[in-house]
Image (tube, rainbow, N blue to C red):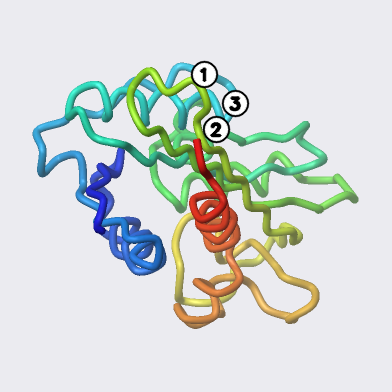
Amino acid sequence: MTQKVVLASNNAGKLREFSAILAQAGIDMVAQGALGVTEAEEPFSTFVENALAKARHASRLTGLPALADDSGLCVHALNGAPGVYSARYAAMAGGEKSDTANNQHLVAQLDGKQDRSACYVALLVYVRSAEDPTPLIAEGRWNGEIVDVPSGENGFGYDPHFFLPDLGKTVAQLSAAEKNALSHRAKALQTLLHGLHERTV
């Protein structure tokens, strides 16, 4: 039996990626915009709170189960920044809102720091209803290092500066298939899928 679930996002790439994996659990994803749902506020400083707010918002307005994600880059030497503000990191410092500006700001903030360890974090929240008391929460992490000089033409966001020591490449140098198999979002989705299979209440 197929279950229709609203994705608390209008990102076409996320819809494709999530749909392909969650179809295994009998889930038919539909983007919130197709159901007339507006973007939710994301006022919190943690990924889990923002994802939960987005999932509850989409579920409340549609009456359907909902899936939301919040993700970003956390850099150890910057006390976890940019974190939930990854998409607007430069803009919050007075710069423009763009991937290029965010990367330039990140590199500038790390100037002179020896520790370049970082991780991509993806936090997924699935709610059966807006008031679901036991939301299913899944987290995926992808460890790497920040490099000053960008490499690669693929990916987006911080990918050209996110270096994977085990592979000797940045994320932007990976193929789409490689990234989708290894990424923080892929790990979170697999954890979520396992949780959906295991859930009885």
SS state under label 1: loop
- Work out which residue is located at the far front of the displayed protein and give it: 200
User: Callout 1: few (<14), some (14-19), or many (20+) C-alpha neighbours within 10 Å?
Assistant: few
SS state under label 3: loop
Task: Point out which mark residue 44 bears.
Answer: 1
State the image quarter where residue 25 is shown: bottom left
Amino acid carrying label 1: it is: Phe
- Tell me if label 2 and label 3 are in contact, CB under 8 Å: yes
Residue at the disc numbered 3? 46
Residue 145 locus on image (x, y percent): 76, 60
- Tell me if label 3 and label 1 are in contact, CB under 8 Å: yes
Residue toward you, 139 or 94? 139
Task: Point out which mark residue 181 bears.
Answer: none
Label 2 and label 3: CA atoms lie apart by 6 Å
Residue at the disc numbered 2? 84
Q: Quick check: 137 above or below 156? A: above
Residue toward you, 118 or 102? 118
- Tell me if label 1 and label 2 are in contact, CB under 8 Å: yes
User: Callout 2: few (<14), some (14-19), or many (20+) C-alpha neighbours within 10 Å?
Assistant: many
State the image quarter where residue 182 is shown: bottom right
For the point 72% across and 35% down, which residue is it?
80
Mark 2, mark 3: which one is toward the viewer? 3
Residue toward you, 4 or 111? 4
Amino acid carrying label 3: it is: Thr
Q: Quick check: 118 above or below 46? A: below
Amino acid carrying label 2: it is: Val
Residue 99 locus on image (x, y percent): 44, 51
| N-term-proximal mark, 2 vs 3 | 3
For the N terminus, give its image quadrant: bottom left
